[in-house]
Image (spheres, rainbow, N blue to C red):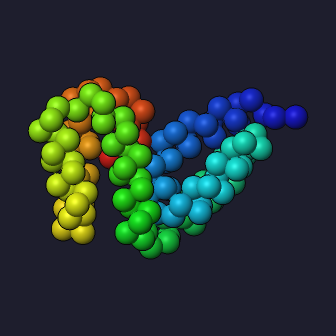
Amino acid sequence: MVNKEGKKAVEKLWRKEKYKVMYYNQNQYNFIRQLMREQLDDISLLEQVIRKTYEMTPTRGSKLNSYQHMWGYFKKIATDDEKVLYQTFIKDFDSNETELHTLLKQLAEKYDVQYLKNSSILF
């Protein structure tokens, strides 16, 4: 039987850490998603997997994937100038990761995207 309080705590932590886990390692992200589908209600297990993930070295691809997923919240509402900035930062990601991070953080504030504002990767 699923522990409802444990499940709520797990879901809250996962919402907060989801994009940061994706940033570090896509396979770990997929592993946690599978645990969530199996009704994970043990927060200590989730914390352990997340800690392990943050010890890994993120790849360029995992970082880009995470930022592109976050951009999905803005692609239909961003101004043309914001879209150009995003494309510029993505095109030369290796030199502009910090700027891209800052842009997404600013857009989360501007458009009041609570899911991202509550995410550990941006704030």
* Residue 40 quadrant: top right
Q: Nearer the viewer, residue 3 or 56?
A: 56
Task: Give residue 116's position: percent from left, percent from top.
Answer: 38, 37
Q: Is residue 61 visible from the viewing direction of this image?
A: yes
Q: Quadrant of the N terminus?
A: top right
Residue at position x 66%, y 57% from top?
A: 31
Outermost residue, right direction?
1
Where's residue 6, x and y in %?
A: 71, 36
Q: Going by the picture, which residue comes out furthest to the bottom?
A: 57
Tell me if residue 44 can be seen. Answer: no
Residue 56 drawn above or below residue 51: below
Instruction: Name the image quarter holding the C terminus.
Output: top left
* Left or right of 5 on screen, residue 29: left
Image position of 72 with respect to 61: above or below: above
Q: In the image as oriented, which residue stretches furthest toward the left?
A: 81
Residue at (49, 71) in percent of width and height: 56
Image location (x, y in percent) of residue 42: 72, 46
Q: Nearer the viewer, residue 51 or 103?
A: 103
Residue at image point 27% right, 28% down: 77
The vertical placement of 50 against 111, above or below, is: below
